Amino acid sequence: MRRPFPSDRTPEGAYLRIAKSLDEGHPREMFAYLETEAQWASYSIRDARAEASGRVAASYPEPERSSLLDAYAPFARAADGADVFALLASKRGWPLRMRRDLSGVASVETEGERASVVTARGTRYPFRRRENGIWGLTLFTAELLAEAERAARDAEVVQKAAADYERGG
């Protein structure tokens, strides 16, 4: 008989749900257990790539148009932030990296809104309590924020270049 998971309002419960999604080959399901900033960054990436794609399609000449549209399309067409996260996770090998270190929970260290799940193998996974009480993994937040900033900068460059192309310059 299977034991029920602890609540996802505990760091252990969130970690076990992440481990289950990775074990079953569904990294997209991890998205619900990322911290809020990481989730927002994923949506920002999609939105910036979609905005840039629209301007590229409307104003860029070939071959730049096709090249940029191919690069931006997977993110621009993503249904939501979870799809963006899954694309980046696959591209950067995050599930493989985590799968190597997943094991049972040895301990949980909680300090205020932050916690670390320590596995039986000694790996520490950092979590932060979200506004809704669910604990979110913070492991990928910095990379997602950096990618969101890169996508926003790219969108600005595309806007300026599109305006130049439209003026014939």
Image (spheres, rainbow, N blue to C red):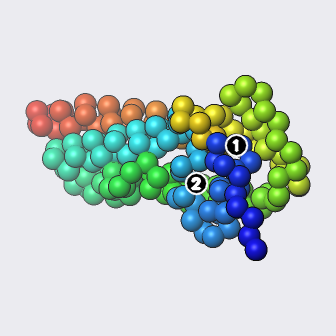
- For marks 2 and 1 on the same chain, the one whose residue lies earlier in the sequence: 1
Q: Residues within 10 Å of mark 1 (few under 14, many from 20)?
A: some
Q: Where is residue 49 shown, x and y percent of the image?
A: 34, 45
Query: In screen coordinates, is 104 left or right of 48?
Result: right
**Residue sitting at x 63%, y 70%:** 24
46 in relation to 73, above or below: above
Q: Toward the viewer: 152 or 120?
A: 120
Name the outermost residue toward the bottom: 1
**Mark 2 to mark 1: distance in Å?**
15 Å
**Residue 53 visible, this angle:** yes
| Label 2 element class | helix
The residue that mark 2 highlights is 30
Quadrant hosting residue 22: bottom right
The residue that mark 1 highlights is 10
117 in relation to 146, above or below: below
Callout 1 amino acid: Thr
8 in relation to 159, above or below: below
Q: Select label 2 or label 1 by which is in front.
A: 1
Query: In screen coordinates, is 65 left or right of 129?
Result: left
Q: Residues within 10 Å of mark 2 (few under 14, many from 20)?
A: many
**Residue sitting at x 71%, y 43%:** 11
**Residue 141 visible, this angle:** no
Callout 2 amino acid: Met
Name the outermost residue toward the top: 112
| Label 1 element class | loop
Quadrant hosting residue 134: top right
